[in-house]
Amino acid sequence: MHVPRPALDWLAEAVLYQIYPQSFADSDGDGIGDFAGIEQRLDHLEWLGVNTVWLNPCFTSPFLDAGYDIADYYTVAPRYGTNDDLARLVDAAGRRGIRVLLDLVAGHTSDRHPWFRASADDPSDERYIWAATEAPPHEGFEPSPGARPGWYLPNFFPSQPALNFGYAHTDPDEPWRLPVDAEGPRANRRALRGIMAHWLNLGVSGFRVDMAASLVKDDPGHVETGRLWRELRSWIDRAHPQAALLSEWGDPAVSVPAGFHADFFLQFGSEDNGRTLRSLLSNRTGTVDEAWPPMEPYFAADGRGTPRIFLDGWQRATKAIDTAGRGGHICLPTANHDFSRPACGPRTAAELPALFAFQLTWPTLPAVYYGDEIGMRYVPGLTDHEGSRLGPSYDRAGSRTPMQWDDDRANAGFSTAPATDLYLPLDPDPARPTVAAQRTDPGSLLHLVRRLIALRKASPELGSGGSVEVLHAGYPLVYVRGERYVVVVNPRREPTEFALPERLSGAAPVEVSGVEVRATRVHAEGFGYGVLDLHAPSGAGTPRPRTTVTP
């Protein structure tokens, strides 16, 4: 099957690293991470081998939702530094071969943004969604805080009024449903172009777009939202052809054909799409939405899960992207600021290497959430901070704790501030992992992640565009990349075996722990993993489809 080449060659080779800036490194001792702190830690990222960094929102904000409530798109939040500090960080990262992506909150602002304050006093302003009714027209509308009568529609928290990009379906009985080509929606599309152009001209390499599916309202199938993003993508391709657009959509089959270069498998989205990621990692601890049906994750020691849910979701998305014909990628994250880390609940440190062996050899763009490379754990029981708690069992703070650099300095090297002044408490476990300790241990998770990234970068067969043939979708998971590498992953504690086809029996170990080929059988110990090399040149043999999954 022909696979269209993505528009951005550099993105096809990206290994992403997500930084939650307030928790990564604090340079000035105020307890909150900042740009200078990130710059001081770029050597770690360069050593690890990541080449693309995504920063969570760093713009001026009242921080009622950790920066996803923006009050000024053109000025960074003072707690992180200045615009010049961000420019220095981007430049310093670039000298190390690391691109920087910013987080763009496209669908809403803070209620303290000057746009909203003006709109709340001007009934003719169409930048937000207003209903001039005596009672709220629907659940979710909030009362006007200004002289303008009526109600406004937020996107998430009440402090996040939705920018008006129009409704796919208008209704004369609901006059606030403006069409997508009304002046307010057109002004907002122009504003998005201006914001993106400003930061792209200062050297960033693109954006991860927050809640990218939320723009046009009452839009079944996201038809109008897709049209909006294709319009913006066409502009980017003309004006900034090397810039990347990644979406927080959670449905690559829709978002990539809609104009994004890549989209993440996420814990939410449609039920099928949310299940794709949760079937790998979610163990009903940490960040759990009670509406999610219980499911056994594949990466669990008891071995009651299945990789088939993920494989089916990945195949559907891959087919839709290929059919659309413009190229694009699926991103597979270890975790994110809204979802539990892999080291969560019953999942132990011994189980993490097999997960990384899978993530860094599967044909997606890998995204490593800060600290996952050393096995930082989700910290339960933290209090709500900057909107972190979404429900009784959905506490995002546990995935946002300070990076653990070393044990020789206060606060694990994150900050010199008193512990009571830290953005969030450190993991209190005295055995918590640190970068410094794992740097000195070649057998550590950190060194394994580094070696796997290096192997992926050196071997096109293991990258985002190489073919994959799944030989066994169970325990162990066995697949062949690019007719060269055999990957074996056993996430359960019990050993298991699989009969390899004779053509693969001569594979030699490259990165192996607890995996051994015995004649034509591969034996995998509990939590074992292996990358084996067939010593075949890339492209040799009979061409195969992009994806083959055998029962």
Image (cartoon, rainbow, N blue to C red):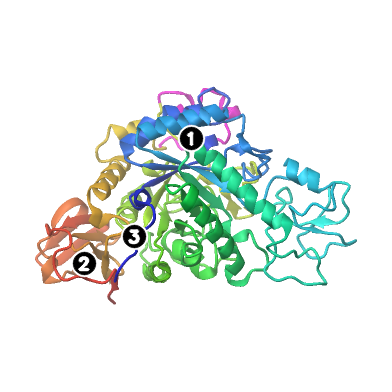
| Number of marks in the rendered image | 3
Q: Nearer the viewer, residue 332 or 305?
A: 332
Q: Residues within 10 Å of mark 1 (few under 14, many from 20)?
A: many
Q: Is residue 162 left or right of residue 194?
A: right
Residue 81 locus on image (x, y percent): 57, 28
Residue at disc 2, secondary structure: strand
- Which three-letter amino acid code belongs to the residue tagged 1? Phe
Q: Residues within 10 Å of mark 2 (few under 14, many from 20)?
A: some
Q: Is residue 409 magenta?
A: yes
- Part of the protein shown in magenta: 408-431
Alpha-carbon distance for marks 1 and 3?
35 Å
* Upstream in sequence: badge 1 or badge 3: 3
Residue 509 locus on image (x, y percent): 15, 53
Q: Is residue 136 left or right of residue 382?
A: right
Which residue is situated farthest in the bottom direction here?
Answer: 551
Residue at 81% x, 72% y is: 172
Instruction: Give the residue pinned by disc 1.
Output: 24
Marks 1/3 in contact by CB < 8 Å: the verdict is no
Q: Residues within 10 Å of mark 3 (few under 14, many from 20)?
A: some
Residue at disc 3, secondary structure: loop
Rendering quarter of residue 134: bottom right
Q: Is residue 546 above or below residue 143?
A: below
Residue at 53% x, 60% y is: 230
Q: Is residue 369 above or below residue 329?
A: above
Which residue is situated farthest in the front direction here?
Answer: 238
- Which three-letter amino acid code belongs to the residue tagged 2? Glu
Rendering quarter of residue 461: bottom left
Instruction: Give the residue pinned by disc 3.
Output: 5
Instruction: Give the residue pinned by disc 2.
Output: 497
Residue at 43% x, 27% y is: 40
Alpha-carbon distance for marks 1 and 2?
41 Å
Residue 340 in view in this figure: no
